[in-house]
Amino acid sequence: MSEQTQLDATQQLAEIKQNYDEKYGFHVPERYVFKAQKGLSREVVAAISEMKGEPQWMREFRLRSLEIFYRKPMPTWGGDLSGIDFDDIHYYVRPTDRQQRSWDEVPEEIKYTFDRLGIPEAEQKFLAGAGAQFESEVVYHSIRKDLEEKGVIFLDTDSALREYPDLFREYWATVIPPTDNKFAALNSAVWSGGSFIYVPKGVHVEMPLQAYFRINTANMGQFERTLIIVDEGASVHYVEGCTAPTYSSDSLHSAVVEIIVKRGGRARYTTIQNWSNNVYNLVTKRAVAYQDAVMEWVDCNIGSRLTMKYPAIYLVEPGAHGEVLSVAFAGKGQHQDAGAKIIHAAPRTTSQIISKSISMHGGRSSYRGLLKVNAGAVGSKSNVVCDALLMDELSRTDTYPSIEIDEKDVTIGHEASVSKVNEEQLFYMMSRGIDEDTANAMIVSGFIEPVAKELPAEYSIELYRLVQLQMEGSVG
Amino acid sequence: MTAVLEIRNLHVSIDGKPILKGVNLTVRQGEIHALMGRNGSGKSTLAYALMGHPAYTVDEGQILFDGQDVLEMEADERSRAGLFLAFQYPVAVPGVTLANFLRAAINARRKQANPEDKGISIQEFRRLLLSKMQMLKIDPSFAGRYLNDGFSGGEKKRAEILQLATLEPKIAILDETDSGLDIDALRVVAEGVNKLIGPNLGVLVITHYEQFLNYIKPQFVHVMFDGRIVEEGGFELAEKIQEQGYDWVAEKYATT
Ligand SMILES: Nc1ncnc2c1ncn2[C@@H]1O[C@H](COP(=O)(O)OP(=O)(O)OP(=O)(O)O)[C@@H](O)[C@H]1O
Ligand SMILES: [Mg+2]
């Protein structure tokens, strides 16, 4: 399958010469029912809560989080955050009054946006459910009837708070408290939208559930909040895609994603992020896996000015397994600071990290990882592989692997490699008639293949295409 | 019309060090030539220079193919014009399957012939590849393996000939395709090459061993010494080298 998709993507290369601006960078005229003033204050936070008609506890949670945000210093590690002006951001933009369950009822311009991005088509073809967030609110949400009948909940997070208040409150912020880091605190204060998923015991959602996040307004901050609960023996695959128009001024995307996988459950969270080059993408993602549960993050970071994202998995009961597979592409003016964090906190837990980064046209990628094995996590196993590919002399790559092992009886493997696009490979391929650009694209596709092959065909095609689009160098 | 590869007074250097010092050689479609010579005499250098490896600088001379100036062309253009090199040391490309690679190579050719071409269909490609694999006794599972990645020495050589068979060039250079093959593989590969040989294919075989030449029967044998072709003849020249080695060549042409 992947063999086919990889080639199809290569063949499409010729047809996708149009640049990011045309394909994803367009924007529709701004039309919103409410747009908060720029800047952050108790009043703005209270107004968001008010407008959403939230219960008192959530309003207090937000305000408390805002205090934490103010108190916490900016991170001094990772990437350059000095370009973020917290006073120059719209924290809440409400594009429409009502959420729809049919695309036909979605307001024309918003529907046009998602049509152009191919979302309704994808939903029909291969999704079990789809959501679409435009600015701060989810404008469309739908799930297949049969899954709904089995008790699967797939809602935007705001609706879930209204419709399932107890379930919601039981798990809310239990994996990532607002005190975790400055941006988690910010998200906790101004969050809006995102997905809420609950999969009941033993239910398998065979096809992916997908949400698509779109920023349209300049100087906008998008702060969606996703909470996924996979009950015992259940399984789900959730996919998120993201794009934004290219503006000269910057936007901020700062999401929080919390996942709970109970005994014997299985969750996979796939991100195909394709932000324009003016987006700061600072996301906190963390999952807890209980006994014999499996948690997988598949994280494809394409685009953005700066991404700081280190999906984490806490393996808290025996036999839990965690995986983080990631691909990052850093092009001109971009810094991808990405990685993974895995904590082995119980016996016989296993994990794998595969990280692939490509730097080109002066881009910079960093792998930042933490692997921790607590005392008592006997018989645990982990394998970490991070490979970086440098496409030219202007680009840069670094690795910051951190491994803390407090238990003797463990098996840990770690490999890191940096390679340059090899003149001999290029010559060999060209000697068969393949032109240089295509040969380069094939080498890069081959490089990310170990991650791409894990994706459903539709998404691996998308990944190959996005990477090739970036390689065209037309972006930025 | 028969395509002709014409090498005239070719001088090639690597990092400023002269390796080829005036090579003259003409290979026509339909002809079989053998190129022999000591280790380090410059045979692979000639092969790389013909194919356009960027590390090999042509300081003097000409290469003409089908009336075109080959030196003006990039490696991919040379390939699409009908030149082929079976590498002495094929390069691995992890993550790219042999099938994908070949399909891209075929499509590059088709696109050259017709810019509107949509590429070979999967079914047609599969049929083509399977029949060629059968001919060379290559297990079909190789199509899905990453190009030369973890292939044994002999498997790599077979895969080179598979590419030759699939791409159907006008002139092919086989750089020590026979070395590293076991006796049975040698026969299979030689028989495979023999089937391809005909009025539409000219071959320049670089080899150290008469055995391979026994199979494919070159009409012309050339001996390279210190960057020049110094002896030329028929099959009997290959036999002489098999019996006597190269000392006599060295004695005759050493310029001390
Ligand atoms: N990349 C390179 N850098 C420096 N010297 C090189 C390079 N490639 C080839 N040479 C030198 O050029 C000379 C000719 O090498 P070449 O590979 O053409 O020999 P050959 O006739 O193919 O030998 P063999 O029979 O061992 O394959 C040798 O002295 C070799 O060391
Ligand atoms: Mg050689």
Image (cartoon, coloured by chain):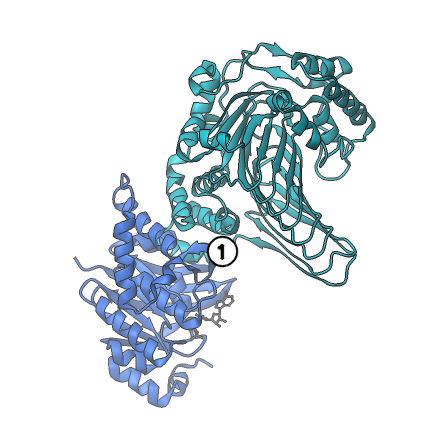
Quadrant containing the C terminus of chain A is top right
* Residue A452 image point, x, y percent: 49, 46
Residue A278 in the figure: left or right of residue A368: left
Callout 1, which amino acid? Glu
* Residue A10 image point, x, y percent: 40, 44
The image quadrant that residue A220 belongs to is top right
- Whether residue A468 is visible to the viewer of this picture, yes or no, is yes
Q: Which chain is blue?
A: B
Above or below residue B69? Residue A143 is above
Q: Residue at x 40, y 67 (%)?
A: B156
* Residue B157 image point, x, y percent: 38, 69
Query: Disc 1 marks which residue?
Result: A423
Q: Residue at x 40, y 29 (%)?
A: A121
> Residue A332 or A70: which is nearer the viewer?
A70
Name chain A's colour. Answer: cyan
* Residue A422 image point, x, y percent: 51, 55
Above or below residue A184? Residue A326 is below
Above or below residue A93? Residue A393 is below
Chain letter behind tag 1: A
- Whether residue B171 is visible to the viewer of this picture, yes or no, is no
Q: Residue furthest bottom?
A: B243
Q: Residue furthest right?
A: A71
The image quadrant that residue A335 belongs to is top right
Residue A335 in the figure: left or right of residue B109: right
Q: Ligand 2 shows up in which quadrant of the image?
A: bottom left
Q: Residue at x 37, y 36 (%)?
A: A15
> Residue A7 or A161: which is nearer the viewer?
A161
Asked whether mark 1 and ligand 1 are closer than 8 Å, the reply comes as no
